[in-house]
Amino acid sequence: MKIHLVLRTLLIVTLSMALAMATAMMPGFQQTELVYADGTSTINHMPLYARAGGNDTPFAMHLTVSGLNQDTAYEFTARIRQGTQDYGSFTTGGNFGTSYLSLGTTASDCGTSCLLSTWVYLRGTTSVSAGASEVRVRVRVVGGSTPAPDDHTGPTFLDMTTGGGWLEETAGTARAGRAVVVRDGADIVGMYVAEDNGVNEGYTSDAGYYRLAVPSCTNCGYTIETWDLSAPGTMVDNVNTMGQGGCPADVTAGSTTSLNACATPTAITLSGLRATSPFAALAVGLLAAAGLVVLRKRT
């Protein structure tokens, strides 16, 4: 009898497992943990600094989410976090808000681990204080349950009366609809997208206009790059260098520095390269044939 009961139990367990496997393989079926999988978010590009104490200066970042299911629509949130509080609002275009926004729909032929990416625009509030932050990202299937967040190291927020200033260009038509990236050596210290970027942040929509926050400095040596939104990290056209080609050299705390006097944009030559420029590092690396690039930050 005991053997009979053991065999019967094994048979029931085996049939249950077979039924579960068969159901999982039925067309259109997805297990719950897959339906609500939130993927893995990666912030590929984001400035090291942003404006504290106000919502008038958004910054841009480029977000990628991997590990998603094919033929599935996703949505996301991205918030600024300091301490135990979430602040600010975000958008990929149009109005800033705090609800989930569309991330997109994965393709039908992307394999078992699909990927989606987008440019995201974030801005703080008057409650965001100077200092460190995190960017908290949540990704879910459209209409799904609230997933656990991914927390990323965020920008350091600048007190704009003592430690930060604004860079602005009203005649940057060559940058229209493209990302404007301000570097200090290899570091991205400011990043936004020039008009018309489709974002209602309160700026003029004149083509090529942009305004972003960066650390204040004297003889900054900042370089200003232009990226096509479809190829984040890849420069198009040439590069402006502060202190050269008509560009101002300084960023004054609490003030707006115009870049309208810069060439559009400055042509870069080997004789005009600064040590802080990524082009200078590339030239040195090629000449040395060593494969190592050392970028000296300003002091």
Image: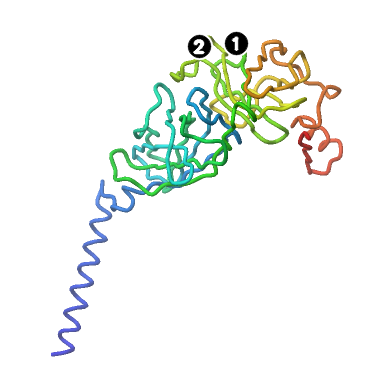
In the image, taking residue 145 as reference, residue 41 lies left or right, namely right
Q: Secondary structure at mark 1?
A: loop
Q: Position of residue 179 (x, y in %)?
A: 57, 24
Q: Classify the position of the C terminus by image quarter.
A: top right
| Figure label count | 2
Q: Position of residue 181 (x, y in %)?
A: 62, 27
Q: Position of residue 51 (x, y in %)?
A: 55, 29
The residue drawn where x is 33% and y is 51% is: 34
Q: Secondary structure at mark 2?
A: loop
* Mark linked to residue 204: 2
Query: As shown in the figure, which amino acid type bears the numbered disc 1?
Result: Thr
Of all residues shown, which one is farthest toward the bottom? 1
Query: As shown in the figure, which amino acid type bears the numbered disc 2?
Result: Thr
In the image, taking residue 254 as reference, residue 20 lies left or right, namely left
Q: Nearer the viewer, residue 203 or 178?
A: 203
Q: Nearer the viewer, residue 102 or 57?
A: 57
In the image, taking residue 54 as reference, residue 275 lies left or right, namely right
The residue drawn where x is 83% and y is 35% is: 284
Circle 1 residues within 10 Å: few <14, some 14–19, many ≥20: some
The CA span between labels 2 and 1 is 9 Å
* Mark linked to residue 229: none
Of all residues shown, which one is farthest toward the front? 161
Q: Position of residue 169 (x, y in %)?
A: 62, 14
Task: Give residue 86's quadrant in the image.
Answer: top left
The residue drawn where x is 56% and y is 41% is: 132
In the image, taking residue 228 as reference, residue 292 lies left or right, namely right
Q: Are marks 2 and 1 in contact (CB under 8 Å)?
A: yes
Check disc 1 and report the residue beneath it.
Answer: 170
Of all residues shown, which one is farthest toward the left? 1
Please say if 61 is above or below 237. below
Q: Classify the position of the N terminus by image quarter.
A: bottom left
The residue drawn where x is 40% and y is 42% is: 138
